[in-house]
Image: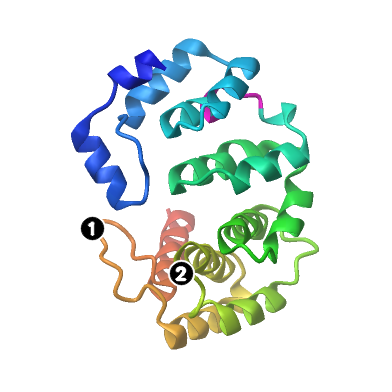
Amino acid sequence: MAELAALEDPRAREVNEKRGDDHGVNLSKLRAVAKRLKTQQELARQLWETNDTAARLLALLICRPKAYEGDELDAMLREAGTPKVHDWLVNYVVKKSPHSEDLRQSWFADPDPVVASAGWALTTERVAKSPEGLDLPGLLDVIESGMREAPDRLQWAMNHCLAQIGIEHAELRARALDIGERLEVLKDYPTPPNCTSPFAPIWINEMVRRAGEGRAG
């Protein structure tokens, strides 16, 4: 904890706080600490229990994802707090867990929109990698009816799923584009130069274009 405190950078904290995070540690330096520590499950559990954001991020880098039970991961998600801890928990731990599908199903329609956003993130992963058994038209129905009014983090996750369906599934692309155009979610999102807009129609068309160029090459 003393080592993490010594990595505190006021400028990094200022930037992170604009995104809803409450730590000031440069993530490259945090990854360097994790690389040195390697996998240490017991230490990861202790770091998580500190309730400190930087410590929890480090915990997620050095833990053993398959060592957690499903109910543990559910509890961790509900107390994750900041967006970065939430994102790393889902992407670095839950996605590698044997409980990921059960958690996806239980989180997807959770009344807590932050928890539901994790369910949508796991669903987006399946849309891209293992869509068998998913009701993709049904997902588009839910997105069409609920995305515009959804809270920010849930809206972002639903929008990602919309884009992924449009990118990966040509037979549903026209409908995904139509939903994106009509709902206009993230249409005016500030996008840095050389980055793809998160507005679904632009995102879908750009990724399909790149895939086409890749095949042509």
Side of 194 relative to 132 (left or right):
left
Q: Residue at x 44, y 43 (%)?
A: 84
With 89 as the anchor, is 111 left or right in this view? right
Magenta run includes residue 62: yes
Q: Nearer the viewer, residue 81 or 216?
A: 81
Name the foreground residue: 129 vs 13. 13
Res 126 quadrant in image: bottom right
Q: Which residue is mark 2?
A: 204
Specify the segment rendered in magenta: 60-64
206 and 57: which one is in front? 57
Q: Amino acid at mark 1?
A: Pro
Q: Where does residue 76 sit, x and y in percent of width and height?
A: 63, 40
* 44 falls in the magenta region: no
- Few, some or many residues within 10 Å of mark 1 (<14, 14–19, 20+): few
- Extreme-front residue of the structure: 50
Instruction: Examine the rendered structure and indicate whether residue 44 appears above or below residue 117.
Output: above
Q: Where is residue 114, by image quadrant?
A: bottom right
Q: Which residue is mark 1?
A: 192
Q: Amino acid at mark 2?
A: Ile
Residue 200 location (% of width, % of height): 44, 72
